[in-house]
Image: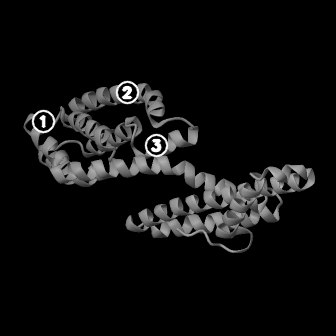
Amino acid sequence: MGKTYGGIFDFEGKSERLEEVNLELENPELWNNPEQATAISKEKSLLDGVINIITSLDETLEDATAMLELAVEADDIDLLKGVVITCAVTIVMYYIQGILSFESQTNAMFDGFKTMLYPLSTVVASFFLKEVNDALGMTQYVINAVTPYLDQATYPAIVFVVLALIVFGTSSSWGVFIIAIPIVIPIAQSLNVHMPLVIGALLSASSFGSHSCFFSDSSVLASQGAGCAPMQHAFTQFPYALLGAVLALVAFVVLGYSYAG
């Protein structure tokens, strides 16, 4: 992307002038005039600062453009509009109230863009993994494989365990719902399983897998907000999620036999 912005942001002009200043500073005769040498040194420092700012803004703009293209491809343009409007209103209100200067808010916003690039790339990678698993028919294969071992009493517990492992391995909670519900619900109806238990098993499996998987969107965004790595966040979450999963499994087994009887 070109960096010809004009005015104080004339990148090409500033770069050419910086080269000239560097050549002047390399001239030994310059240092015979301390005042001129000091003035040129200050100019060099100023030019370095402006060029670094322009370079940083250009890189951030490219990153933001890439995020915009991803959002458009994902049909999230309405959400993007909402984010842009929210940022614009916030900047104006903070400036009017004297909370933050325009420069401070702009720098903070660009820093936020940069900070979100890593979690965004992780989430995008998880989407690729989900697409691969969907193309291979993983979820449907696993459900079909365990179907012969299902009965009215154990059905909710088995659904919970199987789908929790699938969501944990693929980080796709809602994607699993799309594939699993058309299979799980009809089987539950044919076995006359208590339907609230089945729905509870689906939701519980989604919650466990999503919060335990280190590359799921919820874990990545939560870790980013906490200022730690996704793996660190997953390790802190997993003991609590595993405890909840064990208690949920026991509850599904007990309630499954209770309603089956």
Q: Which residue is mark 3?
A: 220
Q: In the image shown, does 201 or 118 lie closer to the viewer?
A: 118
Res 181 seen here: no
Q: Which residue is mark 2?
A: 242
Amino acid type of the residue that numbered disc 3 sits on in the rendered structure:
Val
Res 58 seen here: yes
Q: Secondary structure at mark 2?
A: helix
Q: Is residue 66 above or below residue 129?
A: below
Q: Label 3: how many residues lie within 10 Å, few (<14), some (14-19) or many (20+)?
A: many
Residue 260 picture location, percent across and down: 18, 34
Residue 210 picture location, percent across and down: 38, 41
Q: Which mark is residue 151?
A: 1
Looking at this rendering, what residue extends furthest in the bottom direction?
6
Q: How is the image coloured?
A: one colour
Q: Is residue 107 left or right of residue 46?
A: left
Which of the 4 quarters of the picture holds residue 163?
A: top left
Name the quarter where the C terminus is drawn: top left
Q: Are marks 3 and 2 in contact (CB under 8 Å)?
A: no
Residue at 89%, 50% in the rendered image: 32
Residue at 52%, 50% in the rendered image: 116
Q: Label 1: how many residues lie within 10 Å, few (<14), some (14-19) or many (20+)?
A: some
Q: Is residue 246 left or right of residue 3?
A: left
Looking at this rendering, what residue extends furthest in the front direction?
29
Amino acid type of the residue that numbered disc 2 sits on in the rendered structure:
Leu
Amino acid type of the residue that numbered disc 1 sits on in the rendered structure:
Asp
Q: Is residue 190 left or right of residue 125?
A: left
Q: In the image shown, does 155 or 138 lie closer to the viewer?
A: 138
